[in-house]
Image: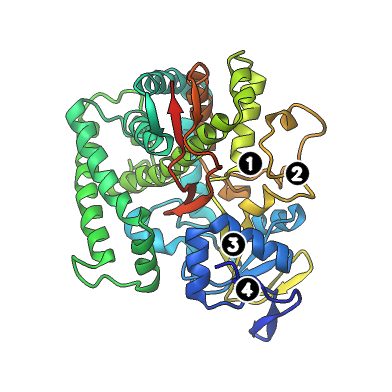
Amino acid sequence: MGDLAREAPGARLRSIGGMDLPPGPRAPALWQTVAWMARPAAFLRRAHDTFGDPVTIRTYWTEEPMVLFSHPDAVREVFRLDPAVAPAGESWEFLRPFAGPHSILLLDGEAHLRERRLMAAPFHGERMRAYAPIVAELARRELSTWSGRVSALERMRQLTLEIILRVVFGAQGDREIAQLRDAVEDTLDIVRSLPTMLAMAVVRRDLGRRSPWGRFRVAVERFDALLLDLVARRRAEPRGDSVLAMLLEQRDAAGNPPTDRHLRDQLVALLVGGHDSSAASLGWAFERLARHPAVHERLREDDPAYLEAVVKEVLRVRPALTIAPRRLLQPVRIAGTALPAGVQVAACLWLALRREDLWPEAAAFRPERWLEGPAPNPMSWIPFGGGMRRCVGAPFAEMEMREVLRAAADLRIRPGHPEGERATRSMLVLTPHRGAEVLVG
């Protein structure tokens, strides 16, 4: 995979619609897909170092070539593209079997804005502040069990899923939570597997119950049955203070409540956006803190500004997400580059957060950078995407990180291995390849 991007700068990929695409790796799409999934950070870094900005890649994630931009001016233009010209939802069509037709991830234009307004309501004001003590208590309970060698990533997956089930879904009782947890994990474990994801990317059809797509379909059907049953019971029970309780209060323009399938798709969007990505970010946080004891020691001072700086620096130096794509339906010009219809364009979050010209010592984990000097360009700190497609649950994710790291301030941790962990892809997110192993005690 080390040779994927070794082509002379300036080499052009074939033209589409009479326009040349920006340069990029010429390796077959299969090899680029392997690198994109197994060594994503290294693949992106080599492509950028060799070809500059923008760079064109070809993987099986999308049928079309994808042009990546990372300079703030270009990123701003990508985020401002008219959804009628460059719909973002079409870039996530492969999620439809799980996300569902009402998902905010797949919608564009006015439909997306309506859904966004509905889903943003639980994540602001008093309601958001009311969730923090619940998250803090669950974090303290989880961290109190840590001893010896611990996979922080796996334990954070368990914690963030429990937070979602209790706070977002409003699940109650050990049996209900255990059933939902098992169904979610059965579904997500299929698409966390690199061989399975490669097979699903290359073969995009359901070939029966034993095929990757077939096993995924069966897992989704089981999950849907449990989730729809939960929604039906919550309609008949006292509302409580969960996110689902607020979503149940929604009404459309005609005054009608949401259907069960609509609620199901909203909950799945929050699950997809808030489980693996938050677990990955927290896993990276423990991996970084274990290798930077001075940072961890300073967290014990309980300085809110420094805690916020640590959260922002983790999200910068080890972003969980890599791209915010759109599919062009019409030709456009971005930062002076003419692009044809029929290609994907993306703000590359990972590259924007790691550019040396924007972040001095970009690879270094230095929370102090957030407390010193001028504020960064807002289009260079984009771990949650940007514009009208910015993650609707970003405020919750940042609150969750603050509460977990505050609870972990007095934990005694050391790295589980001498060398730092590299990034690998698990479904949509970048995770530590050894699971963020730390030694506790």
Kindly give the residue lying farthest to the bottom in the view shown: 18
Expressed as whole percent of the image width and height from the top left, the position of residue 192 reads 37, 53
Q: Is residue 317 above or below residue 218?
A: above
Q: Quadrant of the N terminus?
A: bottom right
Q: Nearer the N terminus, badge 4 or badge 1?
A: 4
Q: In this rendering, does residue 260 appear at all?
A: no
Question: Could you tell me the amino acid type at mark 4?
Answer: Pro
Q: Nearer the N terminus, badge 3 or badge 4?
A: 4
The answer to which of 33 and 235 lies nearer the viewer is 33
- Classify mark 2: helix, strand or loop: loop
Q: Is residue 377 above or below residue 111?
A: above
Q: Quadrant of residue 24?
A: bottom right
Question: Could you tell me the amino acid type at mark 1?
Answer: Arg
Expressed as whole percent of the image width and height from the top left, the position of residue 8 reads 73, 76
Residue of label 2: 359
Residue of label 1: 316
- Classify mark 4: helix, strand or loop: loop
Evaluate if marks 2 and 4 touch, with contact meaning CB atoms under 8 Å apart.
no
Residue of label 4: 25
- Classify mark 1: helix, strand or loop: helix
Residue of label 3: 43
Expressed as whole percent of the image width and height from the top left, the position of residue 68 reads 64, 63
- Classify mark 3: helix, strand or loop: helix
Q: Residue at x 20, y 32 (%)?
A: 176
Q: Quadrant of residue 237?
A: top left
The answer to which of 321 and 77 lies nearer the viewer is 321
Evaluate if marks 3 and 4 touch, with contact meaning CB atoms under 8 Å apart.
no
Evaluate if marks 1 and 2 touch, with contact meaning CB atoms under 8 Å apart.
yes
Q: Nearer the N terminus, badge 2 or badge 4?
A: 4
Q: Nearer the N terminus, badge 1 or badge 3?
A: 3
